[in-house]
Amino acid sequence: KSESKTGSKEEGHPRMMDIDMPEIPLLVADFMWAVDYKGLEASRVLMGVQVIDENKKVRVQEVAPNSAAERAGFKAGDVILKLDGEEVNTYADVTYVLRSKKVGDKLKAEVERAGKLLNLELVFKKTDHR
């Protein structure tokens, strides 16, 4: 009978490597502590908004004080329609655009506020990470 620690051929399980499996549960911190984030924080930019997805729209719930969004004129309740000319339907769209930005870059935003279209421009400054 051919057996491994992960199953046997006779039971209908494919034979896998003969290894000792780690004890469960694994702590999330076991993996998080092993990742080196040096350099990531230095290049990261933030808009400074808390948003929610609503029926293929991204609505600003809160604007952080002294953030790029506040300096650009964002207000709670604004609906983000476009960022740098790209249509925004979900929070993931916002994240995608922000990943291409770095400190010193500008971002053009088209928003709807109380039924009116506004064009705002964000300028990203060095973020103070703690």
Image: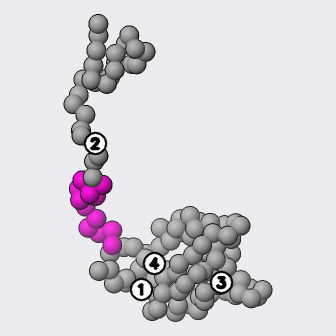
Compute the Cα span from label 1 to label 2. 44 Å
- Residue 23 appears in the rendering: yes
Q: Looking at the picture, does residue 72 appear above or below residue 96? A: below
Callouts 1 and 3 close, C-beta under 8 Å: no
Q: Is residue 81 left or right of residue 102?
A: right
Q: Earlier in the sequence, mark 1 or mark 2?
A: 2
The residue that label 1 is drawn on is 125
Is 36 one of the magenta-colored residues? Answer: yes
* First in sequence: mark 4 vs mark 2: 2
The residue under label 4 is 46
Badges 1 and 2: C-beta atoms under 8 Å apart?
no
Disc 3 residue type (three-letter): Asp
Q: Give the spatial CA distance, label 3 vs label 2.
A: 45 Å
Q: Nearer the viewer, mark 4 or mark 1?
A: 4
- The type of residue carrying mark 1 is Lys
Disc nearer the start of the sequence (3/2)? 2
Dot 1 falls on a residue whose secondary structure is loop
